[in-house]
Amino acid sequence: MARIELNLAHAYRPNPQTEVDYALLPLKMTFEDGGAYALLGPSGCGKTTMLNIMSGLLVPSQGSVRFDGKDVTADTPQQRNIAQVFQFPVIYDTMTVAENLGFPLRNRKVAPDQIKKRVGEIAEMLEMSGQLNQRASGLSADEKQKISLGRGLVRPDVSAVLFDEPLTVIDPHLKWQLRRKLKQIHRELKLTLIYVTHDQVEALTFAQQVVVMTRGRAVQMGPAADLFERPSHTFVGHFIGSPGMNFLPGQVDDSGVHLCGVNVGLPISGVPLPGGDITLGIRPEYVQIVLPQTPGALPMTVGQIRDVGTHLIVSATISGHAFKVRLQSTAVPFAVGEQVWFRVMGDKTCLYKNEEIVE
Amino acid sequence: MNASNKPVNQKAWFLILPVLVCVAFSAILPLMTVVNYSVQDIISPERRVFVGTEWFAAIMRDEELHAALWRQLTFSFAVLALEIPLGILLALSMPAQGWKASAVLVIVSLSLLIPWNVVGTIWQIFGRTDIGLLGAALQGMGVDYSYTGNATHAWLTVLVMDVWHWTPLVGLLGYAGLRSIPDAYYQAASIDGASKFAVFRYVQLPKMRGVLVIAVLLRFMDSFMIYTEPFVLTGGGPGNSTTFLSQFLTQKAVGQFDLGPAAAFSLIYFLIILLMCFILFNWMQRVGTQAKEGDHA
């Protein structure tokens, strides 16, 4: 078990010049010992690169990786004592399920009776006890991935367990079950778990701390609530939540924020804003419907009303910008094509300059 | 759709007629000629006597044939025992990418591009004690080496020549097998703390199994029919020490004009190869389906 500190950048090609050449832009990050983390971001954002750098499969082109303060940048995965589970199941065809699960222990010369005991525990947890003597090559993809997971968890003394989208090939029901198992394992064993995924639900339910990544940059790290309430980058606002945050471009002067020709007022907190261009962000959940002609409210044209079961999603437009509002009630006080007034400035509103939060 | 509701059109048989004609001329008729010879005693072009299975009985009791068959089997198994492990070793030591990989591929394939009789000639000169590198070097080390005079030396020289000629084929097949292993397997093995040997034993070897079966099949068949190289190098001698099956057959048919026994033996030879093919092919199929089950079931 270890505290992992990263202070590095990585480019797959030599002599990176521009930001585009980097798979991971220079970043500083600390993963505390015993935490459950998720790296969340779209495909190609650098999550897997970061994971492979932590496990030692990849050496960063700049900077260092520290485990408990010790520089391990040049160490192999074995030396770092890391466990990693990959996106697609990797099993050893010629071995039985039990041999597969015990392989990491056997390679480390653990006594056979201890291996047997530990493999028994892991199999119990994965509900594979009845299949221990079966040949691993004949199993389904689900079961193979469970073996891969088991191999990642079989060593009780690892620095950290890294998961690279491990539940991609698993069917939804089992996925939910396994995720719960992982949380349970985390509570019981106090292992440091780092989980890569592009599925926000998976990340938010699994991890205590979520790192949101885009285009080689880690834009925000924090608990799920922070990511939702105070996205520090427009990408986070857009990526987290369903539907994502609404963004409207505008200008700031002393009298307030001007959006689409309407002065919506200044933020309630009274924090001074930088002048010039600004982007206002508000979650569809926090938009308020107000009476027509309310000062500071924006008039919008309703384009679509979608019933998604527990709530309604209203799509509206203002000056060509799309805007989504989530309504809890099933009674709709307006119809498609009508003009409705929305208040967008409130205590849940965020303001961004150059995509970074200012308030 | 099952077979019963397919339209029946017997005229379709005509479509396979061209193939039938080709196969008849290229395979069936020549084979029947051999069958014809095998049951007759050809005394002169005008005189022949039907002898039934006499030649078969005679050839089966032929001590020389037994010796040649035994020699052949020993040789083929020695070839496999040497070429397969060496080929795997070669595949493992070849670079995976970059210009080095291309260069090594070309160099490794060189011996495969040399015609059989040239291989024989190369080794004939290579093994000479007066001007050949191998012969002179062995002589210099105090070995009284002579592939023309010493039966063991001759046999070993033919074996080493075949290993030199064909190990690259096994190497290339193995290389293809190795390159098809996804990186994730190596990464997982590295995470699991597997030693180099464990990676070989549990990742590389199982994943190479398919191509290795093909390599075994090819090398067995090929070495079982070896003719040109020993013919050029030793002419089957000294004595009969390097007379393998096909050369024994040639001596009978072309050397002594014993067409009847030669034809009878050709058929037996053919059946032996057919039997071996059958056994190896079935083995290969079984291994193949097991691998498939592993992927999907």
Image: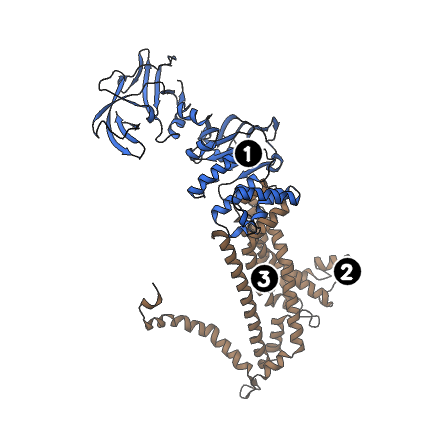
Chain-order first, disc 2 or disc 3: 2
Q: Position of residue B97 (x, y in %)?
A: 55, 44
Please state which of the two labelled residues, at mark 2 or mark 1, is closer to the viewer.
1
**Is circle 1 on the same chain as circle 3?**
no
Q: Position of residue B231 (x, y in %)?
A: 63, 68
Q: Which mark is residue B143?
A: 2
Regarding mark 3 in the picture, which secondary structure is present there?
helix
Closer-to-camera residue (A148/A80): A148
Q: Is residue B209 visible?
A: yes
Q: Position of residue B107 (x, y in %)?
A: 59, 51
Three-letter code, disc 2 = Val
Crowd tier of the residue under label 1, counting other residues whose Cα lies within 10 Å: few below 14, some 14–19, many 20 or above: few
**Quarter residue A275 falls in:** top left
Question: Is A298 drawn above or below residue B220 in the view shown?
Answer: above
**Quarter residue B161 falls in:** bottom right
Q: Quadrant of the N terminus of chain B?
A: bottom left
Chain drawn brown in the picture: B
Crowd tier of the residue under label 3, counting other residues whose Cα lies within 10 Å: few below 14, some 14–19, many 20 or above: many
> Residue beneath label 3, please?
B219
Q: Chain of mark 3?
A: B
- Circles 2 and 3 in contact, beta carbons < 8 Å: no
Q: Determine the colour of chain A.
A: blue
Q: Distance from label 2 to label 1 (Cα)? A: 71 Å
